[in-house]
Amino acid sequence: MTIIWLGGNLLIDNNEKRLIPFMLILVAIFLLLIARLYYLQIYQGQRFKELSEGNRTSLRSISAPRGRIYDKNGKVLVSNKLAYTLSIIPEDVEDLDGILEKLNQIMGLDIALAHEKIEKAAKGKTVRLKRNISHEELVLLEENKSELPGVILEETPMREYVYDKLASHVLGYVGEISASELENLSEKGYNVGDIIGKTGLELYYEKYLRGKEGRELVEVNNVREKIRTLGIEEPIAGYDLVLNIDAQLQENVERILAQELDLLTEQAKEDEDIIEPPRGGAVIVTNPYDGSILAMASLPDYNPNLFVGGISQKDWTRLSTDPKKPLLNRAISTSAPSGSIFKIVTGVAGMEELGVKADTEFYDPGYYKTGGVTFRNWSDVGRGKLDFLEAIAWSNNPVFFQLGHQLYKKDRTVLQEYARKFGLGEKTEVDLNNEATGLVPDPEWRRSYFKNNEDKIWYPGYSINLSIGQGNLRTSPIQLVNLVSAVANGGKLYQPLLVDKIVDRDGKLIKDLEPKLLNELSLSKDTLDTIQKGIKAVTTYGTARRTFEDLPITIAGKTGTAQTGKGRPNHGWFAGYAPADNPEIAIVVFIEYGTSSGNTLPIAKEIIKDYFDLDLISEDEGSD
């Protein structure tokens, strides 16, 4: 650019005048850069210093609360509460071994187990190392958090069984997913450390109760501490279960059963003739017209809260090695002879196949002989002449021995066919896992089960034994309550159901579990009427008369004393319904090694009194 002074004036070349605006723009840009630099280095210097020390983002999973479980009246049986969980994001940890060793020093973390979880975890997933940490552990972790980069403390939902042991076998318990479970369920989104149903309804309805985990994108500092949330995808809670169970009835049933078991245990200590006290028992109360389960008790029981957060080795050893098997749901997993309750099946088969009528006469000398073998009555004294209705009322073995033998002569498997029509030897499809199938022995089973040719033969004696519910027959309480319900409702066999419906958090119906008909027995009216009258006679003038005679309502039922054949006490059974003429409930009572069916009668009576609000005094009664 050329500059000329002329007469004291500054002259600039015209061509170069056009460069001045560009120069001014450059100066302005320069000044803006200086200002921005001042803003970043001085005004925002501290903030960016923190960012320069390792700030970045982290994607963390958020546990979803499991669905709640309610009784039929809306009472919460199972819920969730918040608890602190120690977690780690492996990808954010440089010295994993060092961090785990530090955690071991602070709170005794199982390093081997932690490594196993981390190795099996999906990439980028939060691995939960220990749930429900104590207040003391929480304080120690907070004090040492600067030395634990990548380790986080989070509040996660934890299962809470509100009434401790109440309906423990029904509700079940939860625990961390096992390696074998993860192998089968990883494709469904399960990860290491996830909580999953292990038994009971928690397991059976896992896919509904589980919920869907959420995600949170957070900004963290150099020790992986959360600074702020950048984005969040909220977890979706699992669906809720509404049961057919009545919590108050369930509580009363468990109390009544426990009292009788305690009484029998005390008697066993004082009576030398009692080989051993009962090991446990079960009671089921249902609506006979749709299979809905109003109460299901199994004793001894356990507290499912022990499993929340991980059961201790001491508690697990105690529960798993107890000879009384408190973890066993005797209501559905018991497999034992039914004793004389099976006479209902034999009676139906005798009427339908042999033409037996209510007034058909029999003679009881106190025993039944065939082929050089003597089968005796449960009572040493024969009753002489009696009709079929009386035979049911007095649970007369010789009459049913005769029927069993005649049915064998007609068809070796006809009695078994009737047993299966009543649902024996098959699962009832109750909405719980680990249901016993039971066994209805027949010639085919004997041929396949035994190796010796002589043992493979189905002799008449096997059908005779089966006619009174003995021998190799195996049944469960859930099967027998279904059997007696079919008598009560006119021959319909329903799937027993604990759950009535499944709803979301807002109460919107997700699934309505309608009654499912499993089988409808095509019985003549005469057969059905006679069996109903027969088991009503059991409680009005037969073997159980003294127990129920003071009730203002009439009960129908059948007792059963099942021989164990192992030098141990007999099992005790009762199956019935009330009122006899217009049934509202069906009930089965089982006492494992209960000595006599008579010991089940006070339990049945007290439960019926409680259900119908009858204020009477109970009497014990011995019977078969």
Image (tube, grey):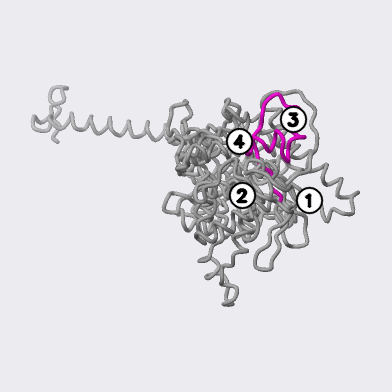
Which amino acid type is marked by label 2?
Answer: Phe
Residue carrying label 1: 381
Mark toward the viewer: 4 or 2: 4
Q: Nearer the viewer, residue 315 or 62?
A: 315
- Type of the residue with mark 1: Val
Mark 1 touching mark 3, by CB under 8 A?
Answer: no
Q: Please check the rendered image and state whether residue 487 is part of the magenta-colored stretch, yes or no.
A: no
Q: Position of residue 87 (x, y in %)?
A: 57, 47
Going by the numbered disc 3, the residue's amino acid type is Glu
Q: Is residue 173 positioned above or below 43 on the image? A: below
Q: Which residue is mark 2?
A: 342
Where in the figure is residue 79, as x and y percent of width and height?
59, 34
Q: Earlier in the sequence, mark 2 or mark 3?
A: 2
Depth check: give the residue in front, 302 or 132: 302
Query: Is residue 383 in view?
Result: yes
Residue 310 appears in the picture as rendered: no
Which circle's residue, 1 or 3, is located before the other in the chain? 1
Which span is picked out in magenta?
533-561
Q: Which mark is residue 533?
A: 4
Q: Quadrant of the N terminus?
A: top left
**Around disc 3, counting alpha carbons within 10 Å, would you say few (fewer than 14), some (14 to 19), or many (20 or more)?**
some
Residue hosting label 3: 549
